């Protein structure tokens, strides 16, 4: 029983394949968004704890390191959203042919980039609006 | 007739017909999270300021509170389903796997309860 081959099978797959890359990225971004959920709940609890507690949390959440995290989270959200919708379309039985999957993989990359750039641009302007 | 012993089903080793439920719940929460997360990101970026007064007023609005609660619950559920599969794939051995899965479940319940309670407290006027 214990001698069975166990995942992750990092050596048996060709890592350059778009199918593998889009799949593992969906999982990685999912885990990243779990971190985002933790940050969100930390922020919600801080708001509920009153103005003085919120000030502390606001200082923590405004750290430079976390600003980089928010940029990554925006990219992560954009990818997981688009790739997730691709999975939902697959679940209806559409787009499963190899050529279609290759085209939709490219479409995922394009849409993710567009959404991420749009959101990042907006976030930057929101930052300018608030001193 | 199933040849699987009731004990095997109880221990959770192998199929206990749980897979379809997991799969379906992951799809349901995905579909719900599309509008919820888009609403949240758009709302967050539309906020004029992140000071306590502004955020409290925003969180206190009925529909904001409703969507925030739905977001936290659905995201926690979806996250739990996703992290569970990662643990099932990469943590080997029944003992460690069961322990990590239990911790993952507890953690997500704490996140969900804390998030919902925080939103309710602000929405119901508990935050000073």
Image (cartoon, coloured by chain):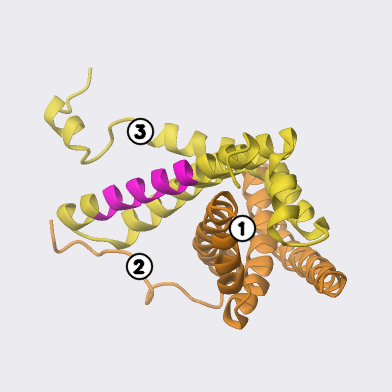
Dot 2: what SS? loop
The x, y position of residue B104, in whole percent, is 34, 52
Residue A37 visible in image: yes
Q: Is residue B112 left or right of residue A127?
A: left
To which residue does mark 3 refer?
A: B18
The x, y position of residue B94, in whole percent, is 17, 52
Quarter of the N terminus of chain B within the rendering: top left
The x, y position of residue B35, in whole percent, is 73, 43
Dot 3: what SS? loop
- Circle nearer the viewer, 1 or 3: 1
Q: Residue furthest top?
A: B1
On screen, B33 above or below A127?
above
Residue A33 visible in image: no
Q: Residue at x 64, y 70 (%)?
A: A70
Could you say which is closer to the camera, residue A6 or residue B75? B75
Q: Label 2 is found on which chain of the structure?
A: A
Residue A8 circle label: 2
Could you say which is closer to the camera, residue A14 or residue B37? B37
Q: Residues within 10 Å of mark 3 (few under 14, many from 20)?
A: few
**Magenta region, residue range:** B100-114
What letter labels the chain drawn in yellow? B
Work out how far the residue at label 1 is from the one at label 2, CA to CA, in angstroms. Answer: 46 Å
Give the color of chain A as drawn: orange
Pointers 1 and 2 in contact (C-beta within 8 Å): no
Q: Is residue B107 magenta?
A: yes
On screen, A8 above or below A41?
below
Residue A51 circle label: 1
Q: Residues within 10 Å of mark 2 (few under 14, many from 20)?
A: few
């Amino acid at each position: 029983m214990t001698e069975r081959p166990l995942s992750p099978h990092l050596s048996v797959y060709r890592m350059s394949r778009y199918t593998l890359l889009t799949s593992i990225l969906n999982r990685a971004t999912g885990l990243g968004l779990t971190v985002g959920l933790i940050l969100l709940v930390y922020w919600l609890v801080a708001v509920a704890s009153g103005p003085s507690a919120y000030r502390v949390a606001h200082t923590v959440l405004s750290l430079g390191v976390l600003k980089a995290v928010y940029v990554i989270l925006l990219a992560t959200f954009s990818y997981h959203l688009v790739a997730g919708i691709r999975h939902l379309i697959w679940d209806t039985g559409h787009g499963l042919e190899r050529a279609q999957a290759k085209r939709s993989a490219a479409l995922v990359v394009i849409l993710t980039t567009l959404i991420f750039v749009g959101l990042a641009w907006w976030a930057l302007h929101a930052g300018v609006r608030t001193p | 007739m199933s040849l699987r012993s009731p004990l095997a089903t109880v221990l959770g080793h192998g199929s206990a017909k749980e897979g379809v439920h997991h799969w379906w719940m992951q799809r349901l929460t995905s579909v719900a999270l599309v509008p919820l997360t888009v609403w949240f990101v758009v709302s967050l970026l539309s906020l004029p300021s992140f000071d306590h007064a502004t955020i409290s007023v925003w969180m206190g609005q009925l529909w904001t509170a409703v969507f925030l609660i739905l977001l936290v619950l659905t995201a926690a559920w979806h996250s739990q389903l996703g992290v569970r599969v990662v643990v099932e794939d990469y943590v080997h051995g029944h003992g460690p796997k069961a322990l990590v899965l239990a911790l993952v479940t507890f953690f997500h319940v704490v996140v969900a309860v804390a998030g919902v309670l925080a939103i309710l407290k602000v929405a119901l006027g508990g935050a000073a």
